[in-house]
Amino acid sequence: MASLDYAYRRLVNTLGPERVARSEFERMVYSHDFASLPKIALLQWRLYPDFVALPQTTEEVSGVVKLSDESLLQITPRGGGTGWCGGSVPNRGGVLIDMRKMNHILGIDPDGRTVAVEAGVSWKEVEDFVEAKGFALPHVPLNAIGSTVGGAINSGSTGFGGLRGGSLRDAVANLDVVLPDGSLLKTASGADAGGALADLTPLFFGAEGTLGIVTKAVLRLIPKPELTRPLTYSFPELPAAGRFLKAIVDAGLTPYHAAAVDRDHFVFERALRSDTPEPVDLALVAVQGSKDEVADQEKALDALASKEGGAKLPPAVGDGLWRERHNNYGARRLSRGLMISYNLVPLRRLPEAVETAARIRDKLKLNGSVQAHLVDSTTAALNPYVLMDDTRPSGGTALGFVKRMGDAAFKMDGHPMGLGLFLVFNLRKMHGNATSAYSAVKGVLDPRKKINGGKTFEVWTKYPWPGLRAIPPPGMAIGLEVAAILRRAKPTRDRFVRAYEHSKEG
Amino acid sequence: MGLLKDWDYVEQAVRIPALAEVIREALIRALFVRDDRVLPASIIGDLNRLPPVTVKVKEDGEVRKLIRVLNGEESTVSLGLNAEDYHFFRTQLGVGRTREFGLTMRPRVLLTYDWIVPEQRGVQLDFTAYAGVEFAEDGHRAIAQVGALWKRLYDDALAAGHLVPFVPTVPLDFAIGDAVCGDAPFGSFRGGFASYVNALRTISPYGHRARIGFEEVANNGTAYDLLHASIPLASEFFVPVAVALRLEAKPGARKTLTYAFDDPAKVSIALDKVSRVGPGIQWVHLTDAVAAKTLRPGPAEAFAVQVSLGTTATGIAAKEKVVDAALAGFKAKTADAPNPFDAPAEAYRKTAEAVARALFVGEVRIPAKSFGDFAGKVRAFGDQSAAKAGIYGSLGSTGIVSAFPSFSAPKDRIKVYDLSKGVRAIVARIPGAAFTGRLTHLWEEEPNFLRRMALWREMKLQIDAAHVVQPLVAP
Ligand SMILES: Cc1cc2nc3c(=O)[nH]c(=O)nc-3n(C[C@H](O)[C@H](O)[C@H](O)COP(=O)(O)OP(=O)(O)OC[C@H]3O[C@@H](n4cnc5c(N)ncnc54)[C@H](O)[C@@H]3O)c2cc1C
């Protein structure tokens, strides 16, 4: 392996000194994503990259990737760093490629109804741009402000518009990808061939930066709807809101978004912002279309909600929640840390799923919120979050919640989402006998495991010694299970939890 | 029988010194039509050799066993054949000798044409008797075995309160499996067939049951989306035996509207406009006069656009108004023509038989605004080629028409080839259009396309390292 100083010089020659960082502080910033990882993780991984590279063009990305053939440094691609399982965090240092300087909107094709963008641009910027031109994106990740186009595609994100406009995968027409050998691949043909002509675009959906670095995307557009109206209904309990979401699909309605949020979320938010609505278990539904269509859907929704004991809340509540729809995790400021567990469950089991999530949270003596939204006509996303204090040694035990939630999702015929650094053990559970086919894909595209290596089929550690270089993925699962057990045995509650419970009682 | 197999065969053939002189396109033609003036007799012999054994599958366990036998892991005895079949099987496949043979799935109905390279000495799987359909008890999901007829799935789903959102653009009597191992053109206004697939139940090249995707839920966030990437080529990586499908709720109200147009420019503009109308449209199909005559009795206008609406009982009138406005310029409108897919199974099958008499060359994807132009050019080309042309099409919400030109001509390979070439030449002159027929995959030489095919080839060789599922063969 070439020396780090030599690797640095080569990177600087490629990008210029201002776009290569190696200070302790900068490296630290990139040593985690949205998930709060306990300090103990540093014993297992080298989470700090050696260098952070900020390319501005596809050619520069390719240059940096090719350099790793000389330096043998690992490459970790990163977008907004808002993922929750460490996909954009290095496991063995190396070069982290921050894509956010590639944030241009390259052009809109009104006839073809597409927009071409660089991968580091945020969804919100793209959404604002296309809306100004009379278009809309059929699918927008929930975290549109923080997440980049390349990051959401690589996370296989769910979001707004799934039920109405199809999955994010279907909303992407073509990608430019720098493959691990540094070459550029266009994943689909120039004309819209509908998946024919060897379209590889779907392969990168959910690939978590393990197959290549997306530098550009062509996204599909739909006409901007005349009207979007958010509606909110309170329910006596969250499972009733879950039944309401299912009833929406059974009635053949196609709102732009439909989510169930428990009252705990609003308790946390209230502690931070006085204009938060009264804590209740509620459903937020956004309908779109012409005035007539919106009115028709609203009437149908009112009837469905009342069947489940739902009461319509004043329009101001829906308007406020809709305005704040991209800011869901304010509670993090209460507790210093937060863990989100992201799962897909069959829609028909959603009422049971929200109950299960609350039960697991309570069993582990955690505080947090249970939330869910519609993904498509068979699927709901179940994404509870729990608070944790990662500055305390006991904080990390909250990670056990993610493990238990994933197990519960499998039991309900669903699955957890994301593999990243610490959920790799789920891969085999997800794909069973087909796992070897998945591993073949990585083997063909990245035979030297240069890009996000040791994150999909094996868990690399930072240690160079044989026997310790990698741990078997089930080992990680055991670790997290132990965390859950410790958490359950924890005799005292966290400081912020006590404060929270006080406010809950009040 | 497979795209990768054909592509790889052609790639290898162009490197054979004796054939290197022949330009690629001429070689593809020679292979396709089995031209003995260009190709050596040994190659013609290979191309004409059909799989010697056909197995009618009744259970997926039989496929597993067969794969293990072909892999040498189990003896032929375990297949439980009677003495005569056993002898036939062993002699035909040369079991016990050091030969490679593969498995191939036989589509129930092929819209276009057979692939170039048949399975050389392997086993053909016939799934017509593996045709069960199972609906989730409480949810809009079905698991259809690959031999299940699409029409049966559609009818049973409606009876159970679901809607199968995807319908065939050309209404042949397809089985569901024809979309993964054949060329059945299923789609809806909102997406292609793949958008409605949650998972494939497959048998891996090692004889294991392997599920690609998740039957009950979408597959977001579970590593690479191998499922949706591989659907067009799935039967070259695995043996798909059943498809887990995402259905929708049967809408509160459904209505089929038929609009007649006499002007190609007007129909093109109207199609572009209606493609911008949001949810509530199930499918939009279009036919020219030739296709319309095959599908429906009565006089046929130059173009007919059929729109299937499905929404709430209270919302359907408003939706119809929006569609009327978008399709302004139509000459006549009727709500009397029934939904062709709701016809009784027997009537549907009869229509399918009539449609299947025409020769199809594959799909052309074309921006709605250029549809009229394309239709005119295809008609003129048909007239020149003494093969009267018609068009079946389906409009998507992306503004792209998926069009299938049909020709009344004998289905011999030379005619298929020449008509395909003609369609390709027309498409090349229309901006934004693509001809996605199987022959295009062999003709195309754009470097990115070649790279993608090469990657698929590599992936196939890794996933099917046992060379069991339609193994690649050299000329
Ligand atoms: C408020 C909030 C709401 C969220 N809601 C959702 C939700 O509804 N659904 C959901 O699925 N997730 C959600 N998430 C998780 C996360 O935000 C999404 O997965 C997000 O889309 C990730 O985008 P990012 O740009 O931050 O990617 P990062 O976190 O930077 O990276 C994610 C993965 O993609 C890879 N990657 C990033 N950019 C590229 C690139 N250009 N090329 C190749 N690989 C790349 C990384 O290596 C990593 O493995 C949410 C997160 C937050 C904070």
Image (spheres, coloured by chain):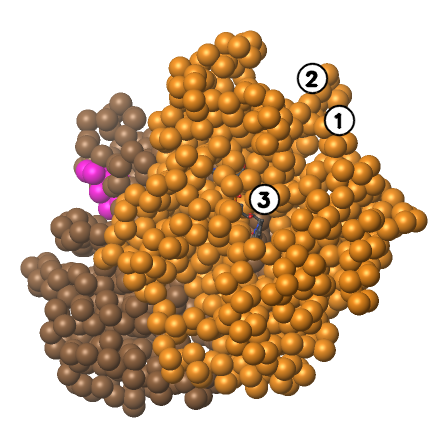
Chain colours: A orange, B brown
Asked if disc 3 is less than 8 Å from ligand 1, the answer is yes
Amino acid type of the residue that numbered disc 1 sits on in the rendered structure: Leu
User: Which residue is labeled 1 in the image?
Assistant: A43
Give the magenta range.
B25-33
Horizontal and vertical percent position of residue A259:
59, 67
Q: Which mark is residue A464?
A: 2
Q: CA distance from mark 2 to mark 1?
A: 13 Å
Is there any visible trace of residue B235 in the rendered image? Answer: no
Query: Is residue A114 toward the left or the right of residue A150 in the image?
Result: left
Using the rendered view, name the quadrant where residue A221 is placed. Answer: bottom left
Farthest-out residue, front: A274
Do callouts 2 and 1 point to residues on the same chain? yes
User: Which residue is labeled 3 in the image?
Assistant: A83
Residue at 28%, 30% (x, y): give it.
B14
Query: Is residue B294 toward the left or the right of residue B396 in the image?
Result: left
Residue depth check, mark 2 versus mark 1: number of the one nearer the observer: 1
Classify B335 as above or below B13.
Answer: below
Q: Which quadrant is home to the C terminus of chain B?
A: top left
Classify B372 as above or below B89.
Answer: below
